[in-house]
Amino acid sequence: LYRLNKWIGLIAGLGAVIFLKTFLLQQSPQLLLYENLIFGIGLFLTYYIIREKRLNEDILKWFLLPVMLNIIIVIMQAFDHYTLPFLPRVNFQETVGFLGNKQTVACFIALSTPLLIRYFKWGLPLLILSLWLCKSISGFTICLISGLCYLYLTNRGRYKIKLRLKILPVILLSLITFATLRYLIIYKKSHIQHRLAMYVGTLDAIKHNPIAGWGWGSFEIVMSLVPPEKSRYCGTQFNYEGSLMNHPHDEPLLGWWNFGVLFPILFICLMINLIKK
């Protein structure tokens, strides 16, 4: 991995060291530790295969299989809430696809808009129908932004946009601004406060182990020990009776928690490296 990308190689090496530290010091239950290890190995192995085999962007068309499967399941759930016994049953009145959350599945489907435009444009009506059934404004916004970005960047053949290229970035910026304002207005103060409580609460715990971290896979266990009345930050709390924070909703923060201060440093270096390329 280091030969392919120095920063990804260093992050993988850091993960190996922290796995050994977590295992020897028993900082996390073995089930959670090995679950995270399998995820990490799968992630780095996927990157290695793509780079080593020099796979081109055409490989992305295979992502249409899970996308179309989720679209079909969403449509089935909209008309028959008892579709398949192994599907998640969060609420029989919701269309949740395979992912168990209607907003998550809507965003997952919406991000495939460029793939559908390129490889399977006849699937676009089904995509729009599934987003409408999920009642996801976020999904529609992502669909518009990703579709326009694809058309703007390719700008070829029958997909060529009739608008001037100087106008299109303004449209994209307007859509992004609309999505941001929608989040601030619809989700209101309480939802924003709850996310801030998660971030600040996580940082407050990180300051007790800022250098070496708490150990890989220990987040959920440690946060479950925080009483709801002690989890109050930014005017609200992140733990409630029967509802505990199991993820900070921020990957750099989670990496800092798991691996220590080296992770955010390497992550920032990786992002700068990718942007330069």
Image (tube, rainbow, N blue to C red):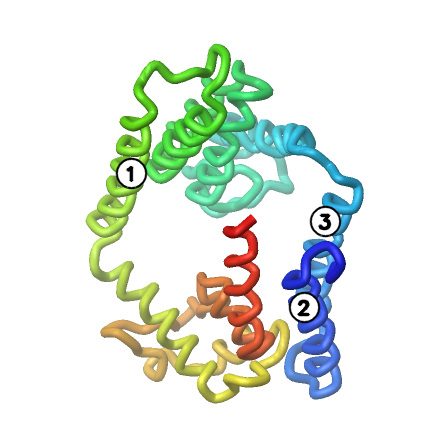
- Which quarter of the image is occupied by the N terminus? bottom right
Q: Which residue ends up furthest to the front in the rendered image?
A: 276
Q: CA–CA distance between discs 1 and 2?
A: 35 Å
**Which residue is under mark 1?**
173
- Horizontal and vertical percent for residue 230? 35, 84
Classify mark 1: residues with Cα within 10 Å, few (<14), some (14-19) or many (20+).
Answer: few
User: Who's the residue at 76% across and 58% down the image?
Assistant: 3
Q: Amino acid at mark 3?
A: Thr
Nearest to the observer: residue 36 or residue 11 = 11
Pick whichever of labels 1 and 3 is earlier in the sequence: 3
Which secondary structure lies at badge 3?
helix
- Horizontal and vertical percent for residue 74? 50, 31
From where the camera sits, is residue 176 visible? Answer: yes
**Which residue is under mark 2?**
10
Pick whichever of labels 1 and 2 is earlier in the sequence: 2
Q: CA–CA distance between discs 1 and 3?
A: 33 Å
Which secondary structure lies at badge 1?
helix
Vertical order, 133 against 266 (above or below): above
User: Who's the residue at 69% across and 34% down the image?
Assistant: 56
Q: Which mark is residue 46?
A: 3
Which secondary structure lies at badge 2?
helix
Number of marks present in the image shown: 3
